[in-house]
Amino acid sequence: MEHIIIIGGGGAGAALAHDLTLRGFEVSLFEKGELTSGTTGRHHGLLHSGARYAVHDRAAAVECIEENRILRTIAPQALEQNDGLFVALSQDDEEYGETLLDACRTSGIKAKKISAAEARALEPALTPEVRGALQVPDATMDAWRLAMYFFATARRSGATFHPFCEVQGIDTRAGRVTGVEIIDYTAGKTRTVKGDLVVNAAGAWAGRVAALAGIDVPIQPGPGVLVAVEGRVTNMVINRMHPAGEGDIIVPQRGLSILGTSLWLADDPEDISPPKEHVDRITALCARMVPAVGEAAVRSVWSAARPLIRDAEASSPQQISRTFECYDHKVIHGVEGIVSLLGGKATTVRAMAEKTAGLICHKTGHEIPCRTRTTPLIPWRCFFSDAPRGGLPRSAP
Amino acid sequence: MKRKIRLKIRRHRPGSETPPRFEIFSLTIDAESSVLDALEMIQGGQDPSLMFRRSCHHSSCGTCGMLINGDERLACVTRISQFKGGTVTLEPLPGFPLLGDLAVDMTPFYRDIDEGWDYLRGAENLGGTKLPDGVERFERFENCIECGCCVSACPVAGEEKPFMGPAALAALNRELQKTEEPATLPLLEQAGSERGERLCNRTLACSRVCPTAVYPARHILDLRTRLRGGRREP
């Protein structure tokens, strides 16, 4: 079968390697740093129910709830499945809650209205000012282990992974991509890798990768700040019942509470130092929902760059859709042999992979159905225990 | 407040003809900067070839364990401001095969940890009086993030040594605590094997360096007590 080169070792690349190997393709994946060192590992760890998007971004909401159900069955040990609450703190919130409840219903998200007293019986750390809540099927994911589930399964199916190997060039001949130029930092050497098709799965870095083939893709890094504080003070994910904004989510995970987030638009996915005022604002806003997080010691502050698809029509960055697209550059730019996977989010990586692998099947003339919806993933630990002793495989494909 | 510091980083590629060396990088950091922030600044601005592992940035993934001024720590939650003097020394975790610079291969870490051991447990009681509809218990991940710091710090564990090490024994004991008889037997056999708890010499380095309060030495003592019929050693 055709040899597919994936550029980018985040969740999308991992899920795509899994899907493609299940369909029988030969897969090599290159990542400039360690696997999951970009956006994938460092988001807040929310497995979206889709409720956050239900009112303004129905496509993303529907994708989220469908994937939410699938991931619970194929990677259960990467999830704390405790559901989530949207909590109302004002009359405006309560009015938004009515819209949200309707939108959840039309998107297929099971949402249940509960009273303030019930919400505080579930989560006593909620502010006494809570006026009501919606229970939704949010969950916490281990952002690293979920991605490693996909990597482990893909490796067992024969995919090869090449971390610390940066793609520095995309080779083309007569309008067709033929392979990539790699600098392998583990050996300090450059080499050429031939492939039948190249997939740009570089997330917020996708613009840089596409530029190597002379292609412009509409990707816009959208960083946000996250704050981890000491102490697990709720078991459920706590969201503010208002339109997508800032400082409106608390994700419990192990013994930490992860507070999020903000959003600004950046040109460089690596120039994303957390602005101090974002940290203060997020912490204060989250403490309005759960006062204890405002008093807790800070464990870590960092930023993660969302891979947003540019949208000149969006009235604010928060309104940019969080759905995904895969682009066949033959159709758009006249360059054969390269596709880009743009947008999306950690919750939907499997669906992103399904659509992209479907496009690859179409382009290569295969009719092979997707099997990732029902194939259980093997645990992340197998990524290491399956590896040959003495190091990860390093041979060129 | 901005501050100038120097990072002294051990550089080496296995198989390279260049012998291991320390390279010094100078940079300006914020009061809040972590060691990982500084490494990312170097990789982004001064040397893209610098190899280190990282992912979550908040001590959940366990990828950025390294020796920081000689101690096993996570780069992501180690603030540089806590160190006096202008130089911080970084080296890869000893006891694991080197991939390059600060990055090690974690394969040996998983040698004695079964892929199927349960990574979830009941969550702590936070005073709630109800469970949400459809949720049978509040659950959470285990504390151990599999970073390898304890194995690296243990004087009797390591890639070439027989001891299964503190992380595997702690994970085994957690699994044992969740297992009912007689399925406990193979776990106890593994703990009591010639590569098991008997090789622990109670240095307690594992518990000292653990960044997520697993305290592996307590789990090893638990196993020792259980294997010896409930008698604690004096």
Image (tube, coloured by chain):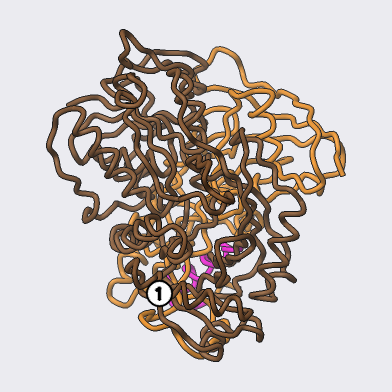
Chain colours: A brown, B orange
The furthest residue to the left:
A367
Tell me where residue A171 appears, x and y as whole percent: 38, 13
What's the residue type where badge 1 is placed? Asp
> Who's the residue at 44% across and 71% down the image?
B121
- For the image, the number of numbered tags is 1
Horizontal side, residue B45 vs residue A342: left or right: right
Pick whichever, B35 or A114, lies toward us. Answer: A114
Vertical comparison of B89 with B49: above or below: below
> Circle 1 sits on which residue?
A102
Tell me where residue A223 appears, x and y as whole percent: 60, 45
User: Where, by quadrant of the figure, is residue A386 drawn?
Assistant: top left
Residue A68 visible from this viewpoint: yes
Quadrant for the N terminus of chain A, please: top left
> Who's the residue at 56% across and 88% down the image?
A116
Residue A286 drawn in magenta: no
Q: What stretch is highlighted in magenta?
A: B213-231
